[in-house]
Image: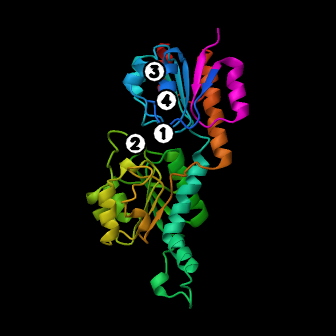
């Protein structure tokens, strides 16, 4: 008898057919909540879940006693109770590597767009306000030769730093990461404690995962340490930053500008001032949102799930101890 998989992510027909070769597959398109009655009714017989943006709770796991593996179509897994999954022997697989370069492209896009005021000035042209030569009141900031401070220096952080150092001759600092001798040799990167990085950097870019330790890692105190000319970029998770403190820092001129792909609440509340501020570039969480990368992410999740439910080690495993205990 085939194992049963609930698919609630964006999988193409080929990927669904690939799953169907191995498992009984039930699909839930545009699943808005784990409270969906049909989804809840299907949980008791589910051996695998595949999808993204679904908050998994211990209560949900109680409703799925046969569950063996969750394959998330994402690199982040802050909406999964990893310790609880491990305790129950449920494998959690994610999709690192395949989205590194695309997300780094987005991060450096935010660096460039915020520095050169690209969105603000494009809107200025659209409104028909470009009636004469551009004056100092519309000048932006150089990127080349500046200091790029990376808070987090994993795959994505290193890829952004590589663009800055090798493409724009930027000096790279990093914090909130273990020593990276190979990257120091490749990029001339220098390790700094967080406070020193904030004080020295022209661009501060956050790429850390969201954990208990990193929630509101950047707040009023940290913004006060930055240069008034600094540009802040967040492509990690919205809750890594105290958003009210960021808004105040931008309004009061404590930092120059911000480029944001993530927010504390997504989609953004209509009351949020951030998308209306001229010194903010706000994107709708598009870090990995290209056709090529999203297809590759979904394929990695499919491959992970097939391997795991067939008793083989998946390619990308979050909770290694659950595999060793199986």
**Residue 68, horizontal then vertical, whole percent:** 52, 17
| Mark drawn on residue 321 | 3
Q: Is residue 307 above or below residue 131?
A: above
Circle 2 is placed at which residue position? 210
As for residue 83 lying within the magenta part, the answer is: no
Residue 188 seen by the camera = yes
Of badges 4 and 1, the one in the foreground is 1
Q: Which residues are magenta?
A: 1-24
Residue 187 seen by the camera = no
Q: Please tell me whether mark 2 sits on a helix, a strand or a loop.
A: loop
Could you tell me how far apart the alpha carbons at marks 1 and 2 are, in whole angstroms?
Answer: 8 Å
Circle 4 is placed at which residue position? 318
Residues packed near mark 2 inside 10 Å, few (<14), some (14 to 19) or many (20 plus): many
- Compare residues 97 and 125 and report the one nearer the observer: 125
Could you tell me how far apart the alpha carbons at marks 4 and 2 are, in whole angstroms?
Answer: 14 Å
As for residue 12 lying within the magenta part, the answer is: yes
**Residue 119, horizontal then vertical, whole percent:** 53, 70
Q: Please tell me whether mark 3 sits on a helix, a strand or a loop.
A: helix
Quadrant, the N terminus: top right
Is the Cβ of the residue at disc 1 closer than 8 Å to that at disc 2?
A: yes
Furthest toward the left, the residue is: 221
């Amino acid at each position: 008898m085939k194992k049963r998989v609930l698919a609630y992510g964006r999988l193409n027909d080929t990927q669904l057919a690939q799953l169907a070769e191995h498992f009984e597959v039930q699909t839930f398109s545009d699943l808005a909540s784990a409270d969906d009655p049909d989804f809840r009714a299907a949980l008791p017989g589910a051996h695998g879940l595949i999808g993204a943006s679904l908050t998994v709770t211990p209560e949900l796991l109680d409703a799925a006693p046969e569950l063996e593996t969750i394959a998330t179509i994402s690199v982040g897994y802050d909406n999964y109770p990893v310790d609880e999954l491990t305790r129950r022997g449920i494998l959690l697989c994610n999709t690192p590597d395949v989205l590194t370069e695309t997300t780094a492209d987005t991060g450096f896009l935010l660096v460039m767009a915020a520095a050169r005021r690209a969105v603000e000035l494009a809107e200025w042209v659209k409104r028909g306000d470009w009636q004469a030569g551009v004056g100092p009141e519309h000048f932006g900031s150089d990127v080349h030769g500046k200091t790029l401070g990376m808070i987090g220096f994993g795959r994505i952080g290193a890829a952004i730093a590589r663009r800055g150092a090798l493409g724009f001759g930027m000096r790279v600092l990093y914090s909130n990461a273990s020593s990276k001798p190979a990257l120091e040799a490749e990029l001339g990167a220098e390790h700094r404690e967080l406070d020193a990085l904030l004080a020295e950097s022209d661009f501060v870019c956050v790429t850390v995962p969201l954990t208990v330790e990193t929630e509101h890692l950047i707040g009023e105190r940290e913004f006060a340490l930055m240069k008034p000319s600094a540009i802040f970029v967040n492509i990690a998770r919205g809750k890594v930053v105290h958003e009210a403190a960021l808004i105040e820092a931008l309004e009061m001129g404590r930092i120059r500008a911000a480029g944001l792909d993530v927010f504390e609440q997504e989609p953004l509340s209509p009351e949020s001032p951030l998308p209306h501020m001229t010194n903010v570039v706000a994107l709708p969480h598009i870090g990995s949102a290209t056709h090529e990368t999203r297809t590759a992410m979904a394929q990695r999740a499919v491959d992970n799930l097939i391997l795991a439910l067939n008793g083989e080690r998946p390619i990308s495993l979050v909770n290694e101890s659950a595999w060793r205990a199986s």
